[in-house]
Structures are given as structure tokens and as C-alpha cells.
């Protein structure tokens, strides 16, 4: 169970730190409101790197169903489909809990923010221009880059300090290149789980539109991108 616990806590920490950056920058009443996209890029990179450093040796630091499915395709999940399912359940639960904690911490700021889309955007991604095909491709390509790069890091799941820096680098690179299109979710546990937490808890703050009409894209597209990246990686290596 240690790997599942690591995935649960690590994903909760990822969402807590990553979505916390978005809350800090975007919500009314935050002392750092308006600090900008560079703050978000650096913060999200660190939000992935910190729990990866803490739990990498225990679970491989997936924190992402797409990464787990990609690892399974490449033969990296010795427990097979049951282990994959356990990882994904732990990740989704962790994402929900991380978002729920943030809603408590930023409760006053959420109440002070009139624009529902701004609040939702702190917990779940959305497109800058709604175009289903292009939005899907954006998440597909970003996750392809993420998974292919993670697969290329020397060592299983990366056990060295250099590996964590590379993880930080790929997250920041994807955000810098694709973040303006769809918010570069690349991760159902980072998007669908907090989106569900928003749907369940945000009505307490007068907010209530989770936008599931778009929400399927950050779930399906990253998985497709991870599958293709893993297949290409195996073909090349």
C-alpha cells in the first residue's frame, strides 16, 4: 500500500501547491494577485518537483493517470492492470483532497471573487479559445512531450537529484509553450478531480459551473498523448 499512499499524498500535494499558485495569483483579496504567468510557470514546475522528490522512491512519482498508463505500456507496472487501477484511484482521490483543502484556505478570497470563471480556472483548466479539435490536440501534444521526456530520464522514475530538475524543466517548458491554449492540464488528477471538488464544494461560495462540456478533454487527450508517446519511445529505443 505504500505506493498507493505515496500517489495519494503526492497528488494532493501537487494540486495543493499547483492550484494554490493559481489561487494566489488570480483571486481577489490575495496579497499576490496579479503577479503573473511567470509566477504560475515557476510555481507549477515546483508543485510537480517537490512531491516527486518526496515520493519518487516509493511510487515512481506518477501523480498522473496518463503517466501511469504510459508506464504500463512500457512495461513499468509490474502489478499489471490492478496496480494501474490502484494508482489512478489514489491519484484522483489525492487531487480531490488537495483541491478541497485549498477551498478552505482560500475560502474568503473565493467569496470575494465575483467572476465564477476565474474561480473555476484556479482549480480546473479551460481553453482560451473554445475549439474542440485544437483544444484536444493541445492537451495531446503537451502530454506527449511530458510522457516522452519522462520516459527518457535515466533510471526508473528518476532517482537522482538531476532527475527532479529535469521534471521541473519539462513542466515549465510545456507551460511556457502550451499554457496559453488550454492551461496545459496534461493530467486528469490535476483537472478532473479538482473540477469535481469545485462542483461539490463551490456552491457553498456561490459558484457552481464546473464546465464538464470541456472537462472531458483534459481527461481523454492526455491519456491518448501518453499512449502514443510510449509507443514511439519503445519503437525508437
Image (cartoon, rainbow, N blue to C red):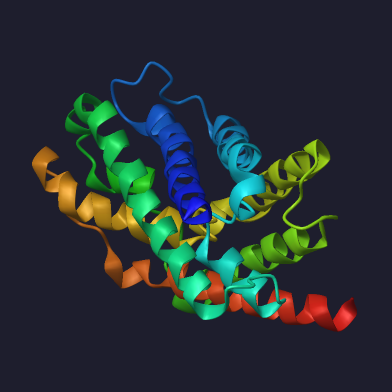
In the rendered image, the quadrant that contains the C terminus is bottom right
Asked whether residue 169 appears in the rendered view, the answer is: yes
**Residue 26 percent coordinates (x, y):** 38, 33
Tell which of 113 and 160 is nearer to you. 160
Residue at x-position 42% and y-position 67%: 130
Quarter of the image for residue 224 reads bottom right
Quarter of the image for residue 103 reads top left
Tell which of 74 and 166 is nearer to you. 74
Relative horizontal placement of residue 16, taking residue 201 as reference (left or right): right
| Image: 117 above or below 229 | above
Residue at x-position 48% and y-position 63%: 87
**Residue 46 percent coordinates (x, y):** 61, 35
Quarter of the image for residue 223 reads bottom right
Please identify the residue farthest to the right as the structure is shown: 237
Residue at x-position 46% and y-position 33%: 21
Relative horizontal placement of residue 169, taking residue 67 as reference (left or right): right
**Residue 166 percent coordinates (x, y):** 77, 45
Relative horizontal placement of residue 227, taking residue 47 as reference (left or right): right
**Residue 234 percent coordinates (x, y):** 81, 79
Asked whether residue 106 appears in the rendered view, the answer is: no
| Image: 132 above or below 99 | below
Residue at x-position 71% and y-position 48%: 173
Amino acid at each position: 500500500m505504500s505506493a498507493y499512499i505515496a500517489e495519494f499524498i503526492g497528488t494532493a500535494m501537487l494540486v495543493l501547491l499547483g492550484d494554490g499558485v493559481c489561487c494566489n495569483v488570480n483571486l481577489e483579496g490575495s496579497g499576490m494577485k496579479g503577479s503573473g504567468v511567470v509566477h504560475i510557470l515557476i510555481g507549477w514546475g515546483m508543485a510537480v518537483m517537490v512531491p516527486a522528490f518526496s515520493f519518487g522512491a516509493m511510487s515512481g512519482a506518477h501523480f498522473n493517470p496518463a503517466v501511469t498508463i504510459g508506464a504500463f505500456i512500457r512495461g513499468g507496472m509490474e502489478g499489471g492492470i490492478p496496480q494501474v487501477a490502484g494508482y489512478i484511484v489514489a491519484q484522483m482521490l489525492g487531487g480531490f483532497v488537495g483541491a478541497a483543502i485549498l477551498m478552505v484556505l482560500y475560502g474568503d478570497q473565493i467569496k470575494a471573487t465575483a467572476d465564477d470563471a476565474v474561480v473555476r480556472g484556479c482549480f480546473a483548466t479551460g481553453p482560451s479559445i473554445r475549439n474542440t479539435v485544437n483544444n484536444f490536440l493541445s492537451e495531446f501534444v503537451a502530454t506527449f512531450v511530458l510522457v516522452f521526456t519522462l520516459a527518457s530520464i535515466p533510471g526508473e522514475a528518476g532517482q537522482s537529484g538531476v532527475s527532479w530538475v529535469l521534471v521541473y524543466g519539462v513542466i515549465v517548458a510545456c507551460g511556457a509553450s502550451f499554457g496559453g491554449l488550454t492551461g496545459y492540464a496534461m493530467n486528469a488528477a490535476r483537472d478532473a478531480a479538482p473540477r469535481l471538488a469545485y462542483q461539490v464544494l463551490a456552491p457553498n461560495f456561490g459558484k457552481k459551473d464546473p464546465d464538464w462540456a470541456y472537462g472531458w478533454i483534459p481527461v481523454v487527450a492526455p491519456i491518448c498523448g501518453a499512449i502514443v508517446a510510449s509507443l514511439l519511445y519503445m519503437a525508437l529505443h
